[in-house]
């Protein structure tokens, strides 16, 4: 059964993958015409399954299936439909397609559950367009930071302007939140984006914790000058200062502990001419660790070193933190429900940490939150070579269908 389920999932993923802003690759950013088309497609899938479909003020698509019990709590399942540039088709969308098909399977099997089920397609998890990210899950959990509305994209458009142009009202964001007392918990299916499940010959894994992450932007300001006439000793070269800072960050991460990793993924240099000494260098940092104190200490020590580098080079440095997400342990009851469902499928249960960030770590602020990982080829992600097999996706859908009654009813019994 599961291979056919996986093939069904892949057909939907391919349909979604065809919606892109860049021909020849997958690139779908928050609050763009491609996001609108993807929302319409997902909304149509949800309506075809009889779900009550709505969109909230931060452009998440939400489909509810009612269990029929009065005052039922809501079990939320979902993931994101925005992508990085030149993405794979699984990172995010699998977490919307899998619950859709799992709910169909569970209903066919006569699902009896004490909770309503809400499937959500978030539009902003990657943070590919605006500095802050997680707009959907932050709004859903009442944690949205209004200051992020002033964040600008590459064209100088603010999140506020983009929401309004998209037909959404920033004033309504608070209404997107689910009340704590009606929230039964959150489950997210996602490719592992790492090598563990493949190395151990497993198709599924249960996430034990999601690492914390700090994202920020550093702006180095130096002095523009003539590339031929300014002697090296007299230069305040913003690019060279940034390069020294980049090596300092890498050195710190390499010598770090607790899985510390640091990435500089986005860089711009000004004025960007061959014969002008750069007077402006802007770069992003993304720092993660399985221990929050290690991450926080690494960022602060790095910034201290970066300021010293700037001062020594006669440059100035400005740092703006754009996103902090704490490490989150996934809910033990939900993990047990997922583990039981995986064991039912005859597999060894493997618990493992997530080095990638997910909406599940934001949802944990409201109540129980857990993730089901799916093996992906060579652990590759954020790359068009990203791949999950029909068998593995089918296993995930079958496991999720089997987990729903376990998780949905367990919570009520213990409430
Ligand atoms: O960056 C992440 O960990 C996720 O892919 N957004
Ligand atoms: Mn993702
Ligand atoms: Mn991603």
Image (cartoon, rainbow, N blue to C red):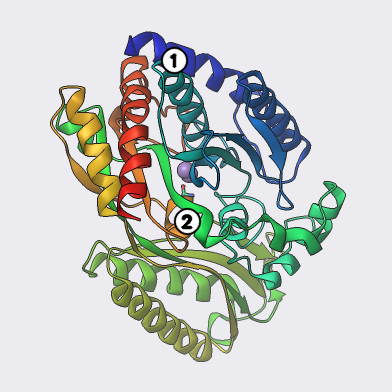
Tags 2 and 1 touching, CB below 8 Å: no
Q: Residue at x 34, y 59 (%)?
A: 211
Q: Is residue 368 above or below residue 230?
A: above
Circle 2 — which element? Answer: helix
Can residue 333 be seen by looking at this rendering? Answer: yes
Quadrant into which the C terminus falls: bottom left
**Which of the two residues, 381 or 252, is positioned nearer the viewer here?**
381
Q: Is residue 286 above or below residue 22?
A: below
Q: Residue at x 60, y 36 (%)?
A: 64
Q: Position of residue 131 (x, y in %)?
A: 63, 62
**Which of the two residues, 273 or 316, is positioned nearer the viewer here?**
316
Mark 2 vs ligand 2: CB below 8 Å: no
**Which of the two residues, 56 or 93, is positioned nearer the viewer here?**
56
Q: Nearer the viewer, mark 2 or mark 1?
A: 1
**Which of the two residues, 26 or 41, is positioned nearer the viewer here?**
41
Q: Position of residue 296 (x, y in %)?
A: 37, 77
Q: Is residue 21 left or right of residue 353?
A: right
Quadrant into which the N terminus falls: top left
Can residue 192 be seen by looking at this rendering? Answer: no
Q: Earlier along the polypeptide chain: callout 2 or callout 1?
A: 1
Q: Residue at x 54, y 80 (%)?
A: 232
Q: Is residue 285 left or right of residue 142?
A: left
Mark 2 = which residue? 363
Mark 1 = which residue? 108
Circle 1 — which element? Answer: helix
Q: Quadrant of residue 98?
A: top left
Graded by Cα atoms within 10 Å as few (under 14), some (14 to 19) or many (20 or more), the crowding at tag 2 reads many
Q: Position of residue 408 (x, y in %)?
A: 38, 40
Distance (Cα) linking label 2 and label 1: 28 Å
User: Which residue in the rendered view is the most extreme toward the front?
Assistant: 70
Find residue 274 and name its label: none
């Amino acid at each position: 059964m599961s291979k056919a389920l996986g093939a069904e999932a892949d057909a939907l993923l391919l349909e979604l993958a065809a919606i892109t802003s860049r021909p020849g690759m997958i690139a779908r950013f928050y609050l763009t015409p491609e996001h609108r088309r993807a929302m319409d497609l997902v909304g149509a899938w949800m309506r075809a399954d009889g779900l009550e479909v709505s969109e909230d003020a931060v452009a998440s698509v939400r489909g509810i299936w009612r269990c029929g019990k009065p005052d039922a709590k809501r079990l939320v399942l979902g993931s994101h439909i925005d992508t990085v540039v030149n993405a794979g088709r699984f990172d995010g969308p699998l977490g919307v397609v899998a619950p859709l098909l799992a709910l169909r399977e569970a209903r066919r099997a006569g699902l009896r559950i004490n909770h309503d089920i809400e499937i959500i397609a978030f539009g902003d998890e990657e943070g590919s367009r605006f500095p802050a990210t997680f707009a959907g899950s932050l709004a859903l959990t009442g944690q949205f930071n209004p200051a992020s509305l002033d964040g600008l994209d590459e064209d100088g458009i603010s999140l506020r302007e983009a929401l309004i142009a998209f037909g959404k009202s920033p004033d309504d964001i608070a209404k997107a939140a689910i009340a704590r007392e009606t929230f039964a918990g959150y489950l997210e299916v996602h490719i592992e984006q790492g090598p563990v499940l493949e190395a151990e010959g497993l198709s599924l894994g249960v996430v034990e914790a999601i690492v914390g992450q700090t994202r920020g932007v550093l702006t180095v300001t130096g002095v523009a000058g003539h590339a031929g006439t300014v002697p090296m000793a007299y230069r305040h070269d913003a690019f060279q200062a940034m390069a020294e800072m980049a090596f300092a960050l890498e050195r710190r991460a390499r010598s770090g502990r607790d899985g510390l990793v640091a990435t500089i993924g986005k860089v711009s240099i000004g004025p960007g001419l061959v014969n002008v000494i750069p007077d402006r260098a802007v770069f992003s940092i993304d720092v993660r660790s399985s221990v929050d104190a290690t991450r926080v200490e690494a960022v602060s020590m790095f910034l201290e070193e970066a300021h010293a580098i700037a001062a020594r080079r006669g440059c100035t440095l400005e740092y703006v933190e754009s996103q902090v997400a704490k490490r989150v342990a996934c809910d033990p009851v939900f993990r047990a429900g997922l583990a039981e469902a995986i064991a039912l499928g005859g597999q060894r249960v493997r618990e493992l940490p997530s080095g990638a960030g997910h909406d599940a770590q934001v949802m944990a602020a409201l109540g129980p939150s857990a993730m089901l990982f799916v093996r992906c080829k060579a652990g590759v992600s954020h790359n068009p070579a990203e791949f999950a097999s029909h068998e593995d996706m089918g296993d995930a859908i079958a496991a999720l269908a089997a987990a729903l009654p376990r998780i949905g009813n367990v919570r009520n019994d213990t409430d």
